[in-house]
Amino acid sequence: MNAKTIIAIWEDLKSTASKNEKLRKVGEGIVITYDPSSGTRKIGIMIDIPWDNTMFPKWSGVLFSMKTYALPTEKDYIVLELSDPEQSNIFAFVCFDLIDNMGTTKGSQRDSIIQETISQWNHFFRENKTRLMSREIQQGLFAELKFLCRLLESNLISNKEAAKSWKGAERAYHDFQYRNRVVEVKSTTGKEPKMVKISNEKQLNDNNIAKLLLLATSLTTIDGGETLQTIVAIINKKLEMEQILQDEFTSKLLKYGLKMEEIEEYPTGYIVENNQSFDVVDGFPRIIEATNGVAEIKYSVLINSCSDFEFTNDDLVGVFVND
């Protein structure tokens, strides 16, 4: 089920609703509903353990509640209700993301995925909607999308595997993960000495990871360079025959903070000055453990100090996807 189908269901329910809430079961423990009394769109998701009010996030434009549906036996559902009609399309992608992530999971695993997915959207719905992404966030997103393009073009893994490997929008520790291998993408537009910012002690920690790779992308801003709009269009073109993957990609962009209707508000053009790939192993300059009483570790790594761990950038995708 894709986002367009979800919107179509709401429209159909609206056209046939009278006074009472109209609902349609779209999966095991999932209902899409329309409430004519308030004129609102909703989704209900069955959960094992009911949420109390303290667990409901405070989102702008979306309300959370609990409700019991008898389908056919009474079960508890968490209900998300759209309260801002201007966010109808975005709400459809939230619902799509929840349904897509749950898949066929059951019980406590299902509950965990619901909580995790909602947590991933917290950043978007708690941010000031009038504020565009900062230049630093734009730059980081551009660098990640450039690597995603490389994965899609490599033909070493499927489009589905490539698209699903991108984790940067999900607030994960690492930007890409394929099986038990990860790539952390860092970007810089600064002058020499080149350095990349590490935001916590987990990013370069390779414990329980088969291979941890660091991609340092040096960008230069230039009129006429490649923009976020350009690279998003390229990726969508590569995924055009796979609507579910396109919707997953759009959901990730939203979670990152990029709305499609605002994409022209990011006109900065980039060219990739240099890509450098590193194998993060023992001896690599990093902080991977915080001592007692130390929190929120942030530091920078000088790229020129990592030459002993550098390998040919052209080999990066192959090293990432091959066991």
Image (cartoon, rainbow, N blue to C red):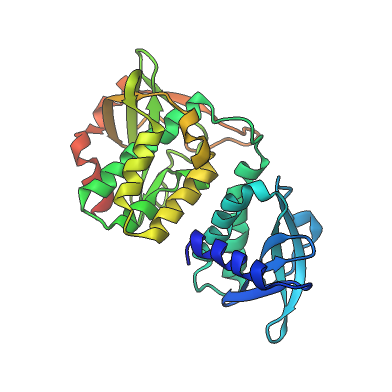
Relative horizontal placement of residue 32, taking residue 222 as reference (left or right):
right
Q: Quadrant of residue 271?
A: top left
- Count of numbered marks: 0
Q: Judge whether 206 appears above or below 101 on screen.
A: above
| Quarter containing the C terminus | bottom left
Q: Residue at x 35, y 32 (%)?
A: 284
Q: Residue at x 71, y 45 (%)?
A: 60
Please provide percent x and percent y for residue 58: 74, 48
Q: Judge whether 309 appears above or below 122 on screen.
A: above
Please provide percent x and percent y for residue 274: 26, 25
Q: Residue furthest bottom?
A: 72
Q: Residue at x 29, y 50 (%)?
A: 238
Q: Residue furthest top?
A: 192
Relative horizontal placement of residue 78, taking residue 154 as reference (left or right):
right
Q: Residue at x 71, y 59 (%)?
A: 81
Residue 172 visible (yes or no): no
Please provide percent x and percent y for residue 251: 50, 50
Please provide percent x and percent y for residue 232: 38, 40
Residue 235 visible (yes or no): yes
